[in-house]
């Protein structure tokens, strides 16, 4: 396994030191009920806060590739926001540890990943039916401008105690604005203000077992805006 990257600014790691890919599969894929949640859908849109190295995108795309064509959406759209974009070299360096598993996906991402890291939107056709929209900028500035129906949320971003600005009312309100009926979310955190913020915008919120040594994480479903 490669070294796990760490942000000094946020005093947090990009993914689990135990096994980042296993964590992604537990927290974001299983936490959102995938692949069952996308079975029978024509198109499925996932929206993520904090693209980082792209590990969550790669794991979701790989799951889609591994699914029987009859049991997966015809097209997959993954939208992700990133305020501090890393370089393609960095991605190559830190995601090398899963070469037996994600090598193909990682190489395609590195090839297609933007060289220009300035703020703005990059629409990347990964494949004819797999699309990645990468928005470089603060999610709190960019999400209010998004116009998409979102089926599933991956709430990543460093831990709320060291990155409280990201886990904002703007985020929760815009999740409610963009969520399809019964849209799901999953996140590694069980912080009270995050659960309350989501509940206030019409999400049913549950705590479940976290990955590895993390006792709890949160998952839930959009039940419609509260009056
Ligand atoms: C835990 S890391 C992401 C891990 C990612 N899933 C990966 O595979 O590398 C959290 C990411 O959220 C980004 N981030 C933090 N605050 C943000 C904000 N306000 N807007 C957008 N991205 C943000 C960080 O720069 C970092 O890349």
Image: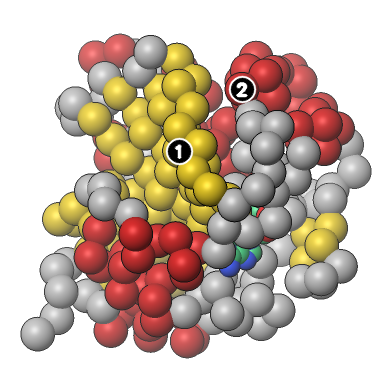
Q: Is residue 190 left or right of residue 212?
A: left
- On the question of residue 9 being in view, the answer is yes
Measured Cα–Cα span from mark 1 to mark 2: 12 Å
* Residue that numbered label 2 is attached to: 112
* Residue that numbered label 1 is attached to: 133
Looking at the rendered structure, the secondary structure element under dot 1 is strand
* Horizontal and vertical percent position of residue 143: 40, 61
Residue that protrudes farthest toward the right in the picture: 3
Residue 145 versus residue 104 in the image, above or below: below
* Horizontal and vertical percent position of residue 17: 81, 52
> 130 and 67: which one is in front?
130
Task: Determine crowd level at label 1: few under 14, some 14-19, many 20+ residues with C-alpha closer than 10 A.
Answer: some
- State ligand 1's quadrant: bottom right
Q: Is residue 17 left or right of residue 85?
A: right
Can you say which quadrant of the picture contains the N terminus?
A: top right
Question: Which of the two labelled residues, at mark 1 and mark 2, occupies the earlier sequence position?
Answer: 2
Can you say which quadrant of the picture contains the C terminus?
A: bottom left
> 138 and 191: which one is in front?
138
Q: Quadrant of residue 13?
A: bottom right
Q: Is residue 2 left or right of residue 77?
A: right
Residue 79 versus residue 171 in the image, above or below: above
Who's the residue at 58% across and 31% down the image?
58
Who's the residue at 51% across and 37% down the image?
122
Who's the residue at 67% across and 19% down the image?
111
> 124 and 4: which one is in front?
124
* Horizontal and vertical percent position of residue 197: 38, 82
Task: Determine crowd level at label 2: few under 14, some 14-19, many 20+ residues with C-alpha closer than 10 A.
Answer: some
* Horizontal and vertical percent position of residue 212: 68, 56
Looking at the rendered structure, the secondary structure element under dot 2 is helix
């Amino acid at each position: 396994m490669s070294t796990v990257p760490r942000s000094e600014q946020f005093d947090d790691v990009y993914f689990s030191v135990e096994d980042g890919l296993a964590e992604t599969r537990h927290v974001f894929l299983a936490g959102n009920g995938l692949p069952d949640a996308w079975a029978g859908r024509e198109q499925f849109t996932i929206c993520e806060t904090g693209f980082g190295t792209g590990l969550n995108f790669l794991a979701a795309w790989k799951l889609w590739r591994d699914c029987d064509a009859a049991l997966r959406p015809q097209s997959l759209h993954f939208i992700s926001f990133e305020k501090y974009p890393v370089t393609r070299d960095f991605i190559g360096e830190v995601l090398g540890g899963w070469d037996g598993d994600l090598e193909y996906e990682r190489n395609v991402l590195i090839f297609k990943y933007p060289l220009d890291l300035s703020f703005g939107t990059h629409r990347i056709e990964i494949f004819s039916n797999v699309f990645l929209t990468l928005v470089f900028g603060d999610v709190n500035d960019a999400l209010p401008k998004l116009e998409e129906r979102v089926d599933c949320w991956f709430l990543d971003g460093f831990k709320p105690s060291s990155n409280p600005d990201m886990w904002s009312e703007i985020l929760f309100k815009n999740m409610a604005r963009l969520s399809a009926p019964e849209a799901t979310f999953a996140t590694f955190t069980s912080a009270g203000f995050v659960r309350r913020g989501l509940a206030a915008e019409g999400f049913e919120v549950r705590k479940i077992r976290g990955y590895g040594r993390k006792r709890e994480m949160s998952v839930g479903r959009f039940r419609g805006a509260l009056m």
